[in-house]
Amino acid sequence: MARFLLRRFGNYLLLVAVATTLGYMLAATSLKPRSNFEGRNPPPPKASVDARLDALNLNDEVPVLTRFGRWAKGAIKGDFGKSISGQPVSSEMWRRMGVSLRLLIIASVLGGLLGVAVGVLGAVKQYKFTDYSTTTISFIILSTPVFLLAVLLKVGALNLNQSVGTTLLYYTGEKTPALAGGTWDHLVDRFQHFILPTLSLVLGQVAFYSRYQRNAMLDVLGSDFIRTAQAKGLRRRDALVRHGLRTALIPMATFFAYQFGLLLTGATFTEKIFGWHGMGEWFVDSVTKNDVNAVVAVTMFAAVLVLIAGMLADLALAALDPRVRISK
Amino acid sequence: MTMPPDLTLAHEEVEASATETSIGSVEELTRGRLVLRRFLRRKVAVVGLVFLVLLVTFAFLGPYIAKWDYKEKDFSSFLEGPSGDHWFGTTQIGGDVYQLTLRGLQKSLIIGFLAALFSTGLAAVVGAYAGYYGGWVDRALMWVVDLLLVLPSFLIIAILSPQFRGKTWLLFVFLLALFSWQITARVVRGMALSLREREFVQAARFMGVRSHTIIFRHLLPNMSSLLIIDATLNVGGAILAETGLSYFGFGVQPPDVSLGTLIADGTRSALTYPWLFLFAGGLLILTVLAVSVVGDGLRDAVDPNSARAS
């Protein structure tokens, strides 16, 4: 078991390295940092542009492998180069990572728990009103892209604020800048800013998991071991939760690993639309600014997160399914 | 949001379709008619199909029943709400939102269908080769699949977007497909693994049929139902991916419009001029919803054992 996990971990590390290399190669060849300097008025002399680009390790006339070598040497020590404005990428990355992680972790935990709960409810009440309504709503949410959902939430919040007459929900930024008041006021303010962005991600997660959880649970409900457990004298609720739910959760671990990349993509929209200064927003801005090193930093962040999600899924699978523990 | 196809289903489906084919040849009821009958019994799926046909018709014929052209500007009305003259209202520069929206819907539909077709085709070939050959071919191909799953396709296509700026949008479709086939490929591989041990494949192999021929003549046709369903479900995913990328300007480039660029333009003033994005948004949700309902209905019709999604 430990050896199996260790082997997976080694494979994951290799994948992160390859993915980051690939990300660097793509970004360094596709994006044109030079355009940031050449477009200025009056156009600066080529020699000074070259000097500036060389200092940033962004000169497209240097072979990409040389640039990569220089970047990788720093990256191993935790220095991911400089952004187009000359700021070190690492410090910016650490600040923004916190913002994104908060959003992502809360969205996956809340989304996973609620999704499983809704799915189980739908399966237990199959073909009843609860089942039909949750299925319909999750179908509609799954067909709504995050950016549209976010904008609709914004419009809804505006209407709500207007009907209440005070600003109940904020939809720009993480907090009110220069807010007076004590700790409590700050907490409330954060929470008011927090609801809509989180909701825009959580809704999709709940819809996604509930659909699969419902199907998995339905498969389990009709099985012999549930009947046996009840025949032994277990109450239906206990049989369903202790025997049924545990089995039905196994496929969810795999889905968790698969959809994490999608959640990351979704968070990009959320951050950009609600003005949170996280990794997603940074990525979109950096691609537009041809800021190669920043783009690579976000790519690496994404690869690491997807693989951590994969690791967690492996662990969850081993915890839930005894066959995995024994066989490997 | 895309949904990965039900992974647990793969093996059952091989079994189910195999038994059905053998029965179907004996009885009068062919498999096709059986599937059709089961599909028609699912009211939601039929409604979805009708909606989808209506949407496609509307997208391609709708522009002819109203005046204006999507490129035309009406300089007598700026930012006006829906009216008899401009059914969906006008934009800041006097463009007709109705014509723009339909133009965007056309583009999004075409891109969605093409990308889904490419990606499922690619997934079928890669998965079948990996499963049939096994060994190092399998390991190498599955490693590529793993690698592409690690890098979210959104990031890669966004990074590559300067490359197709100013070029044909087909390049964008190609990229969308190139980075969205991985999950299906895994399912196909699983099916190929089990199909390759079946008697008819073994027989063909011992008769000396070449491996490529076996894959295209025996393996892939036996998974056709899964592939059709997958392609259908991928259409929704592809449309969502396309609109998302276009929203940030990484996808369809002006002067072309898609539902994504329209929503992006509209949401800047979403709070005061809702008609700028509401129609495009509504059509987008309807389209994806219709496609996924049809895909789900197809899956249940082909594999009644699944009887899952209601």
Image (cartoon, coloured by chain):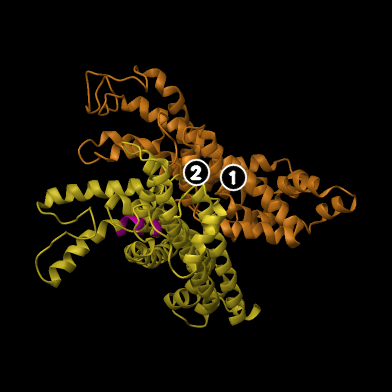
* Chain B colour in the picture: orange
Residue B61 horizontal/vertical position (percent): 45, 22
What residue span does the magenta drawing correspond to? Answer: A198-205
Residue A228 horizontal/vertical position (percent): 55, 78
Q: Quadrant of residue A36?
A: top left
Question: Spatial distance from mark 2 to mark 1, Cα to Cα?
Answer: 9 Å
Q: Amino acid at mark 1?
A: Ser
- One can see residue B308 in this view: no
Chain-order first, disc 2 or disc 1: 1
Number of labels in the image equals 2
Q: Chain of mark 2?
A: B
Residue B87 horizontal/vertical position (percent): 29, 24
Q: Quadrant of residue B26?
A: top right
Secondary structure under badge 1?
helix
Q: Amino acid at mark 2?
A: Ala
Residue matched to label 2? B238
- One can see residue B79 in this view: yes
Residue appearing at x 44%, y 39% in the figure? B287
Residue B295 horizontal/vertical position (percent): 53, 45
Q: Main secondary structure of the magenta part?
A: helix
Q: Is residue B191 left or right of residue A24?
A: right
Spot the yellow chain and give its letter.
A
Q: Which mark is residue B119?
A: 1
Secondary structure under badge 2?
helix
Q: Quadrant of residue A109?
A: bottom left
Residue appearing at x 54%, y 37% in the figure? B171
Would you call the spot at circle 2 few (<14 residues within 10 Å), some (14-19), or many (20 or more)?
many
Q: Chain of mark 1?
A: B
